[in-house]
Amino acid sequence: MDLSNNIISEDIRTIHLTAVCGTAMGAVASMLKEKGYTVTGSDQKVYPPMSDFLRAQGIAIMEGFKAENLDHAPDLVVVGNAVSRDNPEVVAMFEKKIPFCSMPQAVNHFFARGKKTLVVSGTHGKTTTSSLLAYVLYEAGLDPSFLIGGIVRNFNSNFRIGKGNYLVLEGDEYDTAFFDKGSKFLHYSPDITILTSVEFDHADIFRDLDHVKSAFESFMVKHAAESLVVAADGYANIDDILQGKAVAVERYGRQDSSFWRFDNIRIEPPFTTFDVLRDGEFFASFKTRLPGEHNLYNALSVIAAAYRLGLPMDAVGSALARFESVKRRQEIRGEKRGVTVMDDFAHHPTAVKETIKAVKPFYPDGRLIAVFEPRTNSSMRDVFQNAYPESFDDADIVLIRKPPHLEKIPADQRFSSERLVDDLVKRGLDAYFFESTEEIIDYVVRETKPGDLVLIMSNGGFDQIHQRILDQL
């Protein structure tokens, strides 16, 4: 494969993005447009809300991947990570000898140069933590730039080009492009990295947990000596990754030895208030609207990073209290007949467990009805078959949908929703299997009572189940 054109020239005016409708690619396209470039894009699934969002930015979107999409001879093609070598646009790109790059390379070239880069990495909590960090910097008057994998509700956007010195990036361990199978975060050179967690995920690209850990170890190795890693404490996988690495580390968590530690948690809806200790000494008290212990970890990591940056803690505390989270992270979509419908992105067993545990105390007057659609490349495989049953213990009723597009997974590797329901029932849970979204909607509308919370967990649109439930209620 000839990668001689995988170089970004300084003389660029027109840029085309192949697979532009992904969350991060759409953000990069919009940022490039804002910087004054002529931007086009293509994708095989062009539909709202991303299609409307991009068109509102003045970005021309072409339906489908076709060689003629490059007939306007762009100066650069940014290739999305889901695009294969035999994609018609990639074939045409090589034939026409058009320079190309990956999304992380574009971020580095166009947005990271001259900035101090703050990267949030880890299996869980990246989007919420990076969003909170960006908002704290903004409230402290530092006018940050950011690129995040979810819509930050305080900005109503997942990107921003600021005039300040800081760029906040969600550092993804997923692979970069067909010509670069390394993790995206390996392209970044952080001044501060937050490492939230390391577990097995992305079974379509990682063989096992050791393979995942090797990616994070490579990321740690490339940190400069003067950089700082703020790492969650109490996790053996993170201990292994940090062992022997020549980088400054501050650990955060609930261990007695944690350099940054939270304690004295008080749930006072809509806030959770908590104390922070630094190196064993009381530091300050904070409050947040984010429910659950896992979000206290997220907040604590941001407090540690903010301290390293010298931010005034009154500004940090004010931002924490005003932060409204990220769309699709414990987002209340509506309330009808006393029934609350909440949307959440949880799909990994740990995320499902922590999300249910987090929101339950805020709805003491009704039942928590957990609705789960396994649809990621990992959750549709049987790799987590034995882990999911323990994730739903705090739910009152559990509704499990058959995975959509299960035919994409080899028959001997497929996840079984029926078996999960059987295992949940054996644990004493009130659990049900459903072939279709329509059946779940019928059940919810028929069975819910005032005070109930319907917590819907999926990384996809789930057939617009949230609004359809509210409409029928």
Image: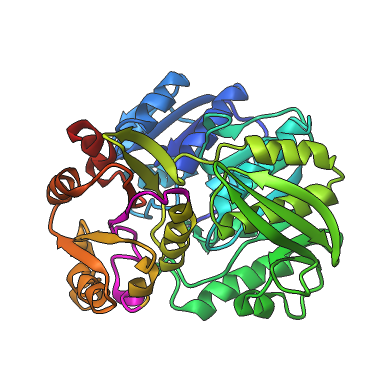
Position of residue 250 measured from the top left corner of the image (x, y, whole percent): 79, 65
Of the pair 284 and 461, the residue shown nearer to us: 284
Front residue (pair 188, 352): 352
Question: Relative to 426, does residue 381 appear above or below in the rendering?
Answer: above
Which residue is at a point 56% across and 43% down the rendered structure image? 148
Q: Which quadrant would residue 304 be assigned to in this image? A: bottom right
Q: Residue at x 43, y 41 (%)?
A: 331
Q: Is-magenta flag for residue 382?
A: yes
Residue 120 part of the magenta segment: no
Q: Is residue 345 left or right of residue 115?
A: left
Quadrant location, the C terminus: top left
Decide: is 48 above or below 5: above
- Work out whether residue 397 or residue 46 is closer to the camera in this orientation and state it: 397
Which residue is outermost to the front? 365
Quarter-of-image position of residue 168: top right
The overriding secondary structure of the stretch rendered in magenta is loop
Residue 100 lies left or right of residue 382; in this view the side is right
Q: How is the image coloured?
A: rainbow
* Residue at 23% in and 61% down: 400
Q: Which residues are magenta?
A: 362-386
Which percent across, then down, holds residue 362? Answer: 47, 49
Residue 42 versus residue 194 in the image, above or below: above
Q: Is residue 191 visible?
A: no
Location of residue 87 in the rendering, given as x and y in whole percent from the top left corner = 33, 49
Q: Position of residue 457 (x, y in %)?
A: 35, 53
Task: Give me the residue at 78% from left, 36% from top.
Answer: 315
Residue 35 appears in the picture as rendered:
yes
